[in-house]
Image: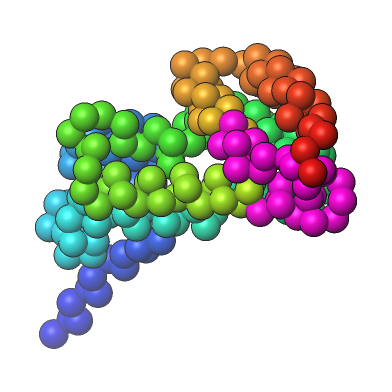
């Protein structure tokens, strides 16, 4: 008697990546189950078996996004020799990454769930935490600039970190609305013009 064929293997990581791309392009609310199963190449029972629920899939997709996307942005912030260069390279790399034609424009963490019905609960909490972590990374780099003597002791690191995080979030929306890389880089130029005003402080 001939042996029965083995079940088709399921590449969970590949399926998760495709789910991430759907959420990135459409947001949590905009991504239907049919969108997700079609992109992932599985049926609804398989999706639930592998990931538990749409909400659990989204949370896992955002974690995957954090691990595989934006690494150049984080590297630009961490490796620049001065705080000013770190902020500028962070924003310039953001302009490059957010405007690539082979992927959804903008940032999943900034755009994934902004509607009223996701203003509370695990999804909103997760995205809010991730956005806060991004702001804290900016804050740490600026505080390092103060500790190294590049920035005055009176430099308001927290306000500056919030400002540049807000600029990055705005660039995400601009990119999703179709802004070109040149337009995003013009935003960077404007944002860096504010650096001198923030850095020129006589506070002790």
Nearer the observer, 174 or 54: 174
> Is 157 on the left-hand or right-hand side of 118?
right
Query: From the viewer's perspective, is 48 left or right of 132?
Result: left
- Residue at 13% of width from left, 85% of height from top? 1
Residue 151 located left or right of residue 159 = right
Q: Position of residue 117 (x, y in %)?
A: 18, 34
Q: Where residue 178 appears, x then y in whole percent?
A: 51, 15
**Would you say the magenta stretch is mainly helix, strand or loop?**
helix
Q: Is residue 47 above or below residue 128?
A: below
Kindly give the residue lying farthest to the bottom in the view shown.
Answer: 1
Residue 83 visible somewhere in the drawing: no
Residue found at the far front of this picture: 204
Q: Position of residue 177 (x, y in %)?
A: 47, 16
Whether the magenta-drawn stretch holds residue 154 is answered as yes
Q: Is residue 39 above or below residue 48?
A: above
Quadrant of image for the C terminus: top right
Residue that appears at 61% across and 51% down: 137
Residue 168 versus residue 139: which sits nearer the camera?
A: 139
Indicate yes or no whether the magenta region holds residue 81: no
Question: Which residue corresponds to the image point at 85% horizontal and 55% vertical from the top-left?
Answer: 148
How many marks are shown on the rendered structure? 0
Q: How is the image coloured?
A: rainbow
The answer to whether residue 4 is above or below residue 190 is below
Across and down, in percent, residue 22 comes to 35, 39
Residue 143 seen in render: yes
Quarter assignment of residue 63 = bottom left
Rendered image quadrant of residue 3: bottom left
Q: Which residues are magenta?
A: 140-163
The residue depicted at 37 percent of the width and 46 percent of the height is 127
């Amino acid at each position: 008697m001939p042996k029965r064929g083995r079940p088709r293997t399921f590449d969970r990581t590949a399926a998760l990546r495709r789910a991430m791309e759907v959420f990135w392009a459409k947001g949590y609310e905009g991504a239907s189950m049919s969108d997700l199963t079609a992109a992932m190449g599985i049926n609804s029972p398989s999706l639930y078996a592998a990931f538990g629920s749409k909400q659990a899939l989204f949370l896992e997709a955002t974690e995957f996004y954090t691990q595989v996307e934006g690494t150049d942005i984080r590297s630009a912030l961490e490796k620049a020799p001065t705080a000013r260069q770190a902020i500028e390279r962070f924003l310039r790399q953001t302009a490059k990454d957010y405007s690539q034609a082979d992927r959804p424009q903008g940032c999943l963490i900034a755009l994934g769930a902004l509607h009223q019905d996701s203003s509370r609960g695990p999804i909103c909490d997760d995205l809010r935490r991730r956005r806060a972590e991004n702001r804290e990374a900016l804050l740490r780099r600026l505080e390092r600039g103060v500790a190294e003597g590049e920035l005055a002791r009176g430099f308001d690191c927290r306000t500056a970190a919030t400002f540049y995080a807000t600029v990055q979030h705005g660039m995400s929306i601009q990119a999703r609305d179709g802004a070109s890389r040149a337009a995003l880089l013009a935003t960077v130029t404007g944002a860096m013009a504010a650096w001198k005003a923030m850095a020129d402080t006589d506070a002790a």
